């Protein structure tokens, strides 16, 4: 059977990018709860707008395959920030079905990390720059 790594990377880009983008679209204009969490932790409220980088801009760049590695780095950083800010108490918890409580975030994180190391493949808007 012939391998098609580029098609596999395209599918990973669509999964990681589209699914997170939907989370970001739902947050457009609704960052008040994020601002409240940041304030509780002693962080500036303006950092709430980082959600748009992590959940909208980076996923769009990942989806189209433009500067995929750079977008994936921002994406992974944002997910780590989300885990630290919102889900730090759940990192090692299991849900009632025996899976990780944060398994969805873990999949996003590991998918983004994989794209950081592999790049977007040849089925991308750009594939010749070191950040692709």
Image: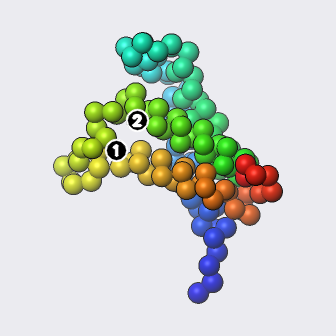
Q: Is residue 44 left or right of residue 87?
A: right
Q: Is residue 82 left or right of residue 68?
A: left
Nearest the eye: 31 or 72: 72
- Residue 68: x %, y % from top left: 68, 49
Q: Which mark is residue 102?
A: 1
- Residue 120: x %, y % from top left: 67, 57
Nearest the eye: 31 or 95: 95
Q: Secondary structure at mark 2?
A: helix
- Mark 2 and mark 1 residues within 8 Å of each other at the beta carbon: yes
Instruction: Classify 17 as above or below 80.
Output: below
Instruction: Please tell me how crowded label 2 is: few (under 14), some (14-19), or many (20+) other residues with Cα within 10 Å.
Output: some
> In which quarter of the view is residue 73 placed?
top right
**Mark nearer the N terminus (2 vs 1):** 2
3D distance between C-alphas at marks 2 and 1: 9 Å
- Residue 101: x %, y % from top left: 29, 45
- Residue 20: x %, y % from top left: 52, 43
Residue tagged 2: 83
Residue that appears at 51% across and 47% down: 19
Instruction: Classify 122 as above or below 62.
Output: below
Nearest the eye: 60 or 112: 112
Residue that appears at 48% across and 47% down: 109
The N terminus appears in which quarter of the rendering? bottom right
| Coloration mode | rainbow
Residue that appears at 57% across and 22% down: 49
Residue 89 visible, this orientation: yes
> In which quarter of the view is residue 60 placed?
top right
């Amino acid at each position: 059977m012939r391998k098609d790594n580029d098609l596999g990377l395209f599918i990973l880009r669509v999964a990681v990018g589209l699914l997170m983008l939907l989370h970001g679209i739902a947050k457009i204009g609704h960052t008040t709860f994020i601002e409240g969490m940041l304030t509780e932790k002693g962080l500036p409220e303006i950092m709430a707008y980082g959600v748009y980088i992590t959940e909208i801009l980076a996923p769009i760049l990942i989806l189209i395959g433009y500067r995929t590695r750079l977008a994936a780095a921002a994406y992974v950083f944002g997910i780590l920030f989300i885990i630290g800010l919102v889900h730090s108490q759940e990192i090692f918890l299991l849900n009632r079905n025996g899976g990780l409580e944060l398994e969805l975030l873990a999949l996003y994180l590991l998918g983004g990390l994989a794209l950081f190391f592999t790049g977007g493949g040849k089925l991308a808007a750009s594939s010749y720059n070191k950040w692709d």
